[in-house]
Image (cartoon, helix red, strand yellow):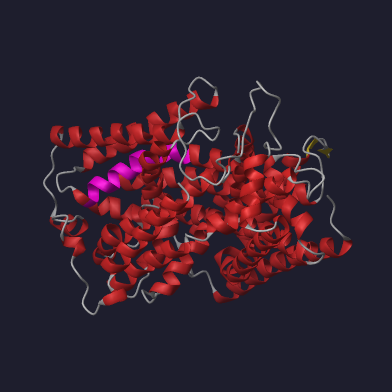
Amino acid sequence: MTLSRIDIYIISAYLFGIVTLGFWAGSRRRKGGEGSHYFLAGNSLTWPVIGLAMFAANISTVHLVSLAESAYKYGLIYGNFEWMAGFTLVLLSLFFAPLYLRSRVSTLPDYLERRYNRNCRDWLAVISIVSAIVIHIGVALYTAAWVLRGILGINPSATIMGVDALTFFIIMIGLLTGIYTMVGGLLAVVMTESAQSVLLLAGAIAITLAGYIRIGGWSALVAALQTHPHPMAGPPGSAVTWTTGNFLSMLRGPGDASGLPWYSIFLGYPVLGIWYWCCDQTIVQRVLAARDEKQARLGPLFCAFIKVLPVFFFVLPGVICVALVQTGAFPAGPKAAADTYTFMIMNLLPTGLKGLIAAAMLAAAMQTCSAALNSTATLFSYDIVKRWRPETNDHRLVRVGKITTVAATVLAIVLSPIFGHYGTIIEGLNKLISYVAPPITAVFLFGVFWKRASGKAAYITLVSGAAAGLIMFVLDWNGWYTGNFMMTAFYLLLLCSALIVACSFLFPEPLREESKPLVWQNWREPLRGVPGSRGLGDFRVLSGIVVLIFIVLYVVFR
């Protein structure tokens, strides 16, 4: 599995162009001063822009690599993380988006301060920084390093300059991205985002169609999966005995090799999904920039429609790869499941396109790191340093942000190999989220829907829930706890919900006047129509259509 000289030239030229653009953007920013360029939308975004921006912010190299990896091992089952997002986006449209827009909060930590107290804001800021370093930057570095190692055909056990190949590439990409972020900042990310997203989607579609044609269509795919053993299956009676008869099923029973029975998905995913789609600044920021409430409600629903596609273009290629190996179309499969996507690139795409798609994957991973590093630096500078030292001027804050970028890069490099500890990258990613999300999800849910939720109760829930999540992570990491991580998230949510309710009664606080616009007075209020909305322009109609579409999909792929 080697690249041609043309492909290597294309990758080198593409990455050189990205870094050069970063330095150019940095020099342009210095000439233009140190003003902030983070929120230029000015509440002018319309629903198509919001929906596409939310989708682009969600999809990255991590999805391409990890979803194909999980599909090669377990089939379509991890596609639930794409389709279940559709239901969560309906919640964002119906209940969260209009409340955020009416209250005119600029950030979600800002919401927690105004709804509860300053302590909640500080805690969320700290947790957001830690989760960005580990979950966003760490997994992006690990995935980018794995892709680069794979496309260069280097064995994972090989050593480069005294360290194993994967660690070497993590360090190299991390340092390059850290420098690129400090110099170019968010401007370079914005300037390259669209091109990279288009290339990623074009590559995913090209690989899916090429594999689909090669296998001979849907009937041939189904036949191959039903009549052949999995290429990674061990001998009868061994620990690894995957079968492929239910590879195209999204809902499985207990005991499935994936460890995701249907009830764990329906109970556990909402905990992760509400945190990610309704309470995470990176995603919700697009909604906060909406022109009006109608656009803020329709944007997430448009994104929900688009979320139908990833199962077919990001997950299905891994299943097709299994069928191609089973039927002998490839003499051998990928050496490791995490190599599935690069294996498909190398074996299905023509020279030139291989290099272009591989370069776009690397650049997109670097872009994810860059955006998260920039957000981390901004959050630390304004929500922590500026909070404790209000007299700090902009010039000093920029210096603090650069130091934060360096520190976050080093920490992400050190921590990113933890994703190699898990069976698949996406499994590791979602396990970490399942330990972080429950207290935040609980605090936001009760903050939005329950007037009696008190600030002290919310803070106790955030701190106690984080401690419980840390304990579960340690137990899981050391193999002392082997329970289903989705059910763990659900149980932690129940614990956090009980905490915030009990503590709200123990430490009651009257709802402040400034907090009243931040909580619904009754559940019917957010379901009232928006002036000028009718037919397909009515968020209630579109919400019903979205829910119906995903129910039908689940019936078909049950």
- Position of residue 108 in the picture relative to residue 333 (left or right): left
The x, y position of residue 153, in whole percent, is 82, 47
Q: Main secondary structure of the magenta part?
A: helix
Q: Which residues are magenta?
A: 432-448
Is residue 228 at all visible to an observer of this figure?
yes
Name the residue at 81% across, 40% down.
Answer: 155
Identify whether 40 is placed above or below 453: below
Identify whether 339 is placed above or below 307: above
Name the residue at 66% across, 56% down.
Answer: 179
Please identify the residue farthest to the left as the structure is shown. 510
Identify whether 215 is placed above or below 269: below
Is residue 59 at all visible to an observer of this figure?
no
Name the residue at 27% across, 76% down.
Answer: 535
- Position of residue 206 in the picture relative to residue 90 (left or right): right
Question: Residue 258 magenta-drawn?
Answer: no
Question: Residue 445 magenta-drawn?
Answer: yes
Residue 237 position by quadrant: top right
Please identify the residue farthest to the right as the structure is shown. 5
The x, y position of residue 42, in whole percent, is 38, 75
Identify whether 369 is placed above or below 413: below
The x, y position of residue 248, in whole percent, is 55, 47
- Position of residue 56 in the picture relative to residue 409 (left or right): left
The x, y position of residue 263, in whole percent, is 38, 37
* Viewer-closest of 390 and 107: 107
Residue 553 position by quadrant: bottom left
- Number of dots carrying numbers: 0
